[in-house]
Amino acid sequence: MTTVKDHVAYSLVSLGCARTLVDSEKMVDALGHGGFRLVEEGSGESVTILNTCSFIASAVEETENNIQHLIKRKKEGVLKHLVVVGCYPSRFGKDSLEKQFPEVDLWLTTKEESTLQATLSKLVFATKYQPKPHPYIKLTPSHYSYLKISEGCDNWCSFCTIPKIRGQHRSKPIAKIVEEATRQMTFGAKELILIAEDTTAWGEDLFGKPSLPLLLKELGKLPVPWIRLMYVFPPRVDASFIQVMKDTKAICAYLDMPVQHVNTTLLKNMNRGHTGEYLKDLVKRLKQEVPNLALRTSLILGFPGETESDVDELIAFLTEAEFAHVGCFAYSWEKETRSARLPNRVDDKTIQARIKRVMEAQFGIQQKIHERLEGTTQTMLYEGNGTGRSFHQAPDVDGKLLVDNTVGLTAGEFYSVRIDGSQGYDLKVSLI
């Protein structure tokens, strides 16, 4: 058998959210076994792989700008092969994209990502490559890891393109998830961050009903200090879910629970499956049941039919609920979605003004939360470069802890700190 002596150097650009990043990490692992070596972009690679997002119009624009940039590099002779994978070809179809961007050598949808190594090998190698052992390459710091527990989504929110892009919900088996978690822990992960399109839907296809508490009990047996839950769907937060949060020491008192809005009419038109009153009661129940709970949420402003009164209602809800972290997004008109057919669209200028209003209100709420934290002692997972996180801060999306003295600190280790004050969305701390 003829073998290729040297690995082919490639770079990878990963757009979008943590779920895409997990997919990218799997691709890197597979390619390392198949004759490819990951390098930094612009360091002499012959292949670039672009893992894409196309959830909303701004993500599509970012993807297409990246494609045009990489096509330019290919025309200049810097790149030999260009590969585009993920949500973008899944949403718009490979046939039409091949006509639009003939310079792209290979298109792979989300369902075809597992074939990347084999398909790219046929494109690049003239002879068959003999796989050799290689170290696993993480795309995130070693001390935390995103753990994707399922693929796809069956919720069909009226504004969302994900079910069309990612397909039906499919849960990973418990054994596979535990295996992946254990593997990440061997690389030094002290925090496992559970992600999916909807983490609370896990197990529905395996057991006939959503069964996330069952998975959490198994993960809770692992010797990992922190388990963090992201993308929690409000209607599926029930008594068994709350109980396992309380009973499992490793589960952080933190929930990322996107609510999108609180107005019942808008929630109905969004097809969220619950009312505003349900949300208000749920938040109260969670804070009563889980001590020191930090809630993160995301909101959509400018959904068709939204009024100034609806925004007033939302701000009143935020004031009462006191979310620790809030992300606010402009409604994006996507022609494939049911909400695109709704009347009473809100103009962009009004949407931006509403976002500004909501985020200014949230900043004031967050400052009050920070004031209550002053003088308290927290456990910090140190990130390096003078920053860390407590249990109520997820990486990339929330504020950070700013450390006054970093002498002797090691990234990825835990330290006790005192909250001294705030700086914007971040907290200033000192070592104890």
Image: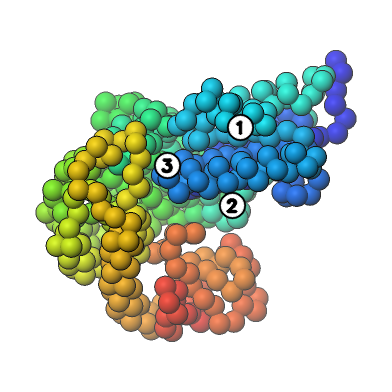
CA separation, marks 2 and 1? 31 Å
Please rate how many residues cluster around mark 2, counting C-alpha atoms within 10 Å: few if below 14, some from 14 to 19, many from 20. Answer: few
Task: Give residue 374's position: percent from left, percent from top.
Answer: 37, 82
Please rate how many residues cluster around mark 3, counting C-alpha atoms within 10 Å: few if below 14, some from 14 to 19, many from 20. Answer: some
Task: Give residue 56's position: percent from left, percent from top.
Answer: 41, 44
Three-letter amino acid code of the residue under disc 1? Phe
Question: Label 1, on which residue?
Answer: 101
Task: Give residue 408's position: percent from left, percent from top.
Answer: 65, 76
Residue sitting at 39 percent across and 64 percent down?
392
Q: Earlier in the sequence, mark 1 or mark 3?
A: 3
Residue sitting at 49 percent across and 35 percent down?
87
Three-letter amino acid code of the residue under disc 3? Phe
Q: Secondary structure at mark 1?
A: loop
Q: Is residue 273 left or right of residue 131?
A: left
Residue sitting at 28 percent across and 69 percent down?
357
Q: Looking at the picture, does residue 14 appear above or below residue 431?
A: above
Question: Label 2, on which residue?
Answer: 140
- Give yes or no for contact between labels 1 and 3 (Cβ–Cβ under 8 Å): no
User: Looking at this view, is 345 or 235 the one in front?
Assistant: 345
Q: Looking at the picture, does residue 320 appear above or below residue 170?
A: below
Q: Secondary structure at mark 3?
A: loop
Residue 90 badge:
none
- Give yes or no for contact between labels 2 and 1 (Cβ–Cβ under 8 Å): no
Q: Earlier in the sequence, mark 2 or mark 1?
A: 1
Question: Label 3, on which residue?
Answer: 55
Q: Secondary structure at mark 2?
A: loop
